[in-house]
Image (spheres, grey):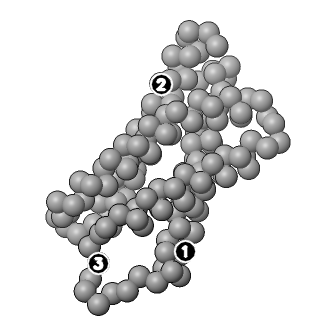
């Protein structure tokens, strides 16, 4: 990859990562109590890690898009699902505030993991769609 193309690819990856990170912070703020509790700050490292992963994968997805291989979209969706499941598993394993008397069942955890896998797939697909191969002028 030429230096100019590499620089443009990094700028696009940065824009995609920052855009998704800002979007997720706004979505999380919309769902939080107002004003957000101090524990809200604990979700920001997860958003940061997600942004770094998006930055890392966006260039790869742009390369897959330019190759037009038949497996590329399925692999993107699968990677997103795995990332969502991993994040969902980490969050589910963390001790968190649970209302007294509320019991979290195995079905609740499975539903949580299914939702996180689906959200991860959608996010990965968005990163793929916004990734532009370097040889395409912007």
Element marked by disc 2: helix
Q: Residue 30, image x and y in percent?
A: 31, 63
Q: Residue 72 or 85: which is nearer the viewer?
A: 85
Q: Residue at x 45, y 33 (%)?
A: 15
Q: Residue under circle 2?
A: 11
Q: Residue under circle 1?
A: 110
Residue most extreme to the top: 3
Q: Residue 92 or 22: which is nearer the viewer?
A: 92
**Horizontal placement of 86 versus 23: left or right?**
right
Query: Does label 2 or label 1 sit earlier along the sequence?
Result: 2
Q: Does residue 58 lie above or below 97 as drawn?
A: above
Q: Quadrant of the N terminus?
A: top right
* Residue 103 found in image quarter: bottom left
Q: Quadrant of the C terminus?
A: top right
Give the CA separation, mark 3 to mark 1: 17 Å
> Mark 3, mark 2: which one is toward the viewer?
3
Q: Does residue 67 lie above or below 116 as drawn?
A: above
Q: Residue 21 or 115: which is nearer the viewer?
A: 115
Give the CA separation, mark 3 to mark 2: 41 Å
Query: Does label 3 or label 1 sit earlier along the sequence?
Result: 3
Q: Is residue 22 visible?
A: no
Q: Residue at x 52, y 33 (%)?
A: 56
Query: Does label 3 or label 2 sit earlier along the sequence?
Result: 2
Q: Residue at x 17, y 60 (%)?
A: 38
Q: Residue 77, image x and y in percent?
A: 66, 52
Q: Residues within 10 Å of mark 1 (few under 14, many from 20)?
A: few
Q: Residue under circle 3?
A: 98
> Mark 2, mark 1: which one is toward the viewer?
1
């Amino acid at each position: 990859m030429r230096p100019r193309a590499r620089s443009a690819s990094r700028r696009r990856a940065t824009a995609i990562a920052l855009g998704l990170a800002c979007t997720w912070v706004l979505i999380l703020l919309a769902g939080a109590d107002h004003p957000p509790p101090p524990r809200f700050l604990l979700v920001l490292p997860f958003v940061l890690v997600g942004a770094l992963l998006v930055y890392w994968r966006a260039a790869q997805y742009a390369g897959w898009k330019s190759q037009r291989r038949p497996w590329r979209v399925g692999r993107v969706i699968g990677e997103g699902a795995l990332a969502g499941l991993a994040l969902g598993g980490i969050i589910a394993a963390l001790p968190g505030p649970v209302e007294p008397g509320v019991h979290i069942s195995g079905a609740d955890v499975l539903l949580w993991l299914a939702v996180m896998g689906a959200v991860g797939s959608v996010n990965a697909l968005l990163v793929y769609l916004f990734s532009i191969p370097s040889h395409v002028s912007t």
